[in-house]
Image (spheres, helix red, strand yellow):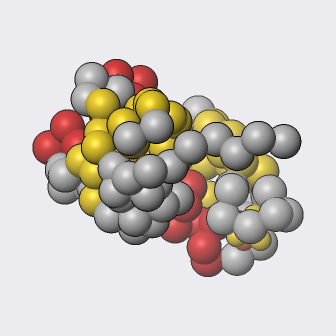
Amino acid sequence: MDKKIICIQCPIGCTVNVEYDGDNIISITGNRCKKGEAYAKKEFVCSYRVLTSTVFCKTTKGIFPLPVKTDGEIPLEMLREAVKEIRKTVYTAPINAGDVVYENILNTGVNVIATKSMPYDFKVRNL
Ligand code: SF4
């Protein structure tokens, strides 16, 4: 049996073919480098992704979306649940870019961090 995996480790995007027999990998072809082989092995077992999303953050001027991301990869199948979990809370400013806003999301050992600073008096500027 074969499974085709698009390597996303660089912009080339090689189509990597994983030939397997039951649960065991027989061969990996189509990758141009070792990174692709490692990525395909990992993806074959379980897909992982960095979560990027937004949460709500309260400032003295209102509630605004705050962009966040995980500081590591989590299983792909957990992304939806993780987004639901982080959005149960309205976070409170001030928050600095890089601050952990949610620790150990879904017991993965991965934290969710702010990717933008949100000062306590943040407001949307008039255009
Ligand atoms: S296999 Fe190597 S060259 Fe191909 S997409 Fe992955 S990282 Fe890039």
Counting every numbered tag in the picture gives: 0
The residue at the point 52 percent across, 67 percent down is 38
Query: Is there any visible trace of residue 85 in the rendered image?
Result: no
Q: Is residue 4 left or right of residue 75?
A: right
Image x and y of residue 118, in percent: 46, 54
The residue at the point 14 percent across, 43 percent down is 107
Image x and y of residue 27, in percent: 58, 57
Choose between 78 and 3: the one closer to the eye: 78
Query: Is there any visible trace of residue 65 in the rendered image?
Result: yes
Image x and y of residue 95, in percent: 36, 58
Q: Quadrant of the N terminus?
A: top right
Choose between 109 and 90: the one closer to the eye: 90
Choose between 9 and 59: the one closer to the eye: 59
The residue at the point 64 percent across, 41 percent down is 124
Choose between 108 and 68: the one closer to the eye: 68
Q: Quadrant of the C terminus?
A: top right
Q: Is residue 101 left or right of residue 50?
A: left
State ligand 1's quadrant. bottom right
The residue at the far left in this view is 107
Q: Is residue 115 above or below residue 32?
A: above
Image x and y of residue 20, in percent: 51, 43
